[in-house]
Amino acid sequence: QIQLQESGGGLVQAGGSLRLSCTASGEIYKRYAAGWFRQAPGKEREFVAAFPWRAGNTYYADSVKGRFTASRDSVGNTAYLDMYVLKPEDTAVYYCAASTSSLGDIRAKDSYDYWGQGTQVTVSS
């Protein structure tokens, strides 16, 4: 089991920035990839960013490319999502996730076994 705890959401004006954190505990050695997803009211959960935990490319949704940066700390417990030039359409509950298999597409939510509880990001115009 892997437990994920997000933090860092909040209310920000358009053009502002936020950093989300996702701290993992439990069997973190099983983690293959870390992903960030978001869900706006009335919409399906959508991919934001993901990367293989040990090495590999980082993937971004087209809607956030160039504005968001996904990363991890050197210790290996925490993933980050740095969000810049935020727009009202970025308003959503943001979730971090962990996958334990290298077989799936890490841009697909079905590839993830563990999810955090979500953190609200609200961008005002």
Image: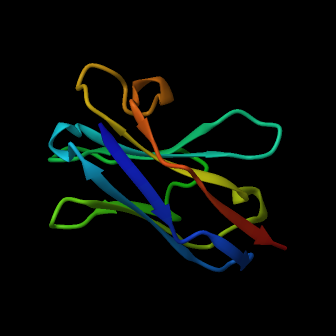
Res. 84 image quadrant: bottom right
Q: Position of residue 45 (x, y in %)?
A: 64, 36
Which residue is at 33% across, 21% downward?
Answer: 104
Res. 103 image quadrant: top left
Q: Position of residue 115 (x, y in %)?
A: 46, 41
Which residue is at 49% across, 30% downward?
Answer: 109
Above or below, comparing residue 61 to residue 89 in the picture? above
Front residue of 51/10: it is 10
Front residue of 15/73: it is 73
Which residue is at 76% across, 56% downward?
Answer: 89
Which residue is at 66% across, 53% downward?
Answer: 93
Res. 76 image quadrant: bottom left
Q: Position of residue 90 (x, y in %)?
A: 69, 58
Q: Is residue 108 left or right of residue 122?
A: left
Counting every numbered tag in the picture gives 0
Above or below, comparing residue 31 to residue 93 in the picture? above
Q: Is residue 67 left or right of residue 26?
A: right
Above or below, comparing residue 89 to residue 98 in the picture? below
Q: Position of residue 86 (x, y in %)?
A: 66, 69
The coloring applied to the image is rainbow
Q: Quadrant of the N terminus?
A: top left
Front residue of 29/107: it is 29
**Which residue is at the far top?**
103
Above or below, comparing residue 30 to residue 55 in the picture? above
Q: Is residue 99 left or right of residue 40?
A: left
Q: Quadrant of the C terminus?
A: bottom right
Q: Is residue 63 left or right of residue 125?
A: left
